[in-house]
Image: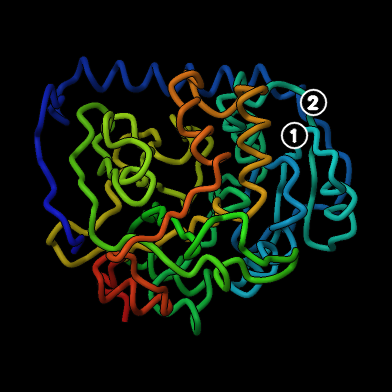
Amino acid sequence: MFPFDVQKNQGNTQPRNDAVFAYRMRWKRRRLLYRAWKRRAEITRVSGPAVPDKGVLVFSTMRNEMLRIEHWLAHYRSLGASHFLIVDNNSDDGTPAFLAQQPDVTVWSTPNSYKASRFGVDWLTCLQHKYGHNRWCLTVDADELLVYPACLTRSLTDLTSHLDAEGRTAFGALMLDMYPKGPISQVDYSASEDPIGVLEWFDADNYRAKLHPVFGNLWIQGGVRDRLFFGAQPERSPTLNKTPLVKWQRGYAYVTSTHQILPRRLNDVFELGSGDRVSGVLLHTKFLPNIRDKSKEELSRAQHFENSNLYATYYNALIDDPDLWSESSVKYAGPKQLLDLGLMSQGKWE
C-alpha cells in the first residue's frame, strides 16, 4: 500500500461501462497504432542477431548513453532478460558501436525527430508489433533500473510466471528519482559502475496520487523534482507511475511514454488495498554528472517534452549544479527497504 492518500473519482471521470467512451478509446488506440505504422520506415536495423522466440524482451530508445549503457545491460541481464531491442536516435558518443558488439542486443537506428515520434514510442511500437506479440515486453529508458520484491533472487521469468498464473497482463512500477548528497557535479562516477553507488538518496514520502480521469491509471507525482523545481506549478511536475512490463498483443499502444497504455484495463496495476498486486520501482538515475550537459543540449534541441518552454527553468536549475539532498532524504538500502516503505507491493507473490 502506497504511503500516501489516493484521491479517487476526481474531476470528470468517465465510467467504465460508458459505450461512447469505450468507442472513443478504441479509436484513439487505432490512431496511435496507425501513426506508429506510418513511422516504420524511419528506423533501420543496423546490427545484432535474430530476436529469440523465448524469454522477456527489453525495449528502449536512447541517445548518447555510453555513461550508463554497460551497467544498464548488466542489470537487466542479471534479472534474466532474454534480448534487448534498442532504437538508437543518432548517438555520436560510441553507443551504436558498443551495442553492435553485444551478443544479445539488436539495434535499429534513426536520425529522425524523437519528439515527433512521441518520444520514441512510435518506433518501439513498430518493434513490439513485430517481435513482442504474446510475449512479455519490458520497456525502459537507459536511466531506469527496475527492482521488484525478491529481485535479488528471482528472475523476470519468475515474475512473469506469477503474473501469468494470476491472469495479469501488465505490471506497474513507481519511478523513483535517485540523487547524490551534495552538488551533482561533485559525483565521482565512471562508466560501467553501478550508478546507485553514487546516487544513494531518494525522497520517501512526499508523493500524491489520483486516478486519471481518462485512462484510469494511478497518476502519481511528487519526489525530489516536485520538491525543488515545480513547487509553484505542482501540476506540471513529472508523472512517476509507469506500466513498463506488459504481455504484449498487437492491438496494444502506449499513450505517453509508459505512463499510460491502451486498452485502458492494462493500467490497473497498483495495489490500492486489495492485497493482490505485485509492483516494482524504477530507480531513476537521471542525476549523474552528465545531466548538466544533457540539460544544455535539451534546451537547444527541445526534444523531450510537448512544451519544452515550460521546462526551461528546470533545465537551467540543473545546469546551475544544485544539491538535491535534504534532511528528509533517505539512503537507499535495497529492494526490501522500498517494500517496507510501501513504494512497491508484494501482492500474492510469495
Q: Is residue 153 above or below residue 341?
A: below
Residue occupying image coordinates x 28% and y 37%: 231
Q: Position of residue 244 (x, y in %)?
A: 47, 50
Task: Determine which residue is flagged by label 2.
Answer: 111
Assess whether mark 1 and mark 2 are in contact (beta carbons under 8 angstroms).
yes
Farthest bottom residue in view:
153
Residue occupying image coordinates x 63% and y 36%: 124
Q: Is residue 192 above or below residue 231?
A: below
- Left or right: 284, with 298 as reference point: left
Q: Position of residue 27 (x, y in %)?
A: 39, 16
Residue occupying image coordinates x 27% and y 47%: 268
Q: Position of residue 194 (x, y in %)?
A: 63, 71
Kind of residue indicated by mark 1:
Asn
Residue occupying image coordinates x 42% and y 73%: 332
Q: Is residue 186 above or below residue 109?
A: below
Circle 2 Cα neighbour tier, 10 Å, few/some/many (<14 / 14–19 / ≥20): few
Q: Nearer the viewer, residue 331 or 183?
A: 183
Task: Determine which residue is flagged by label 1.
Answer: 89
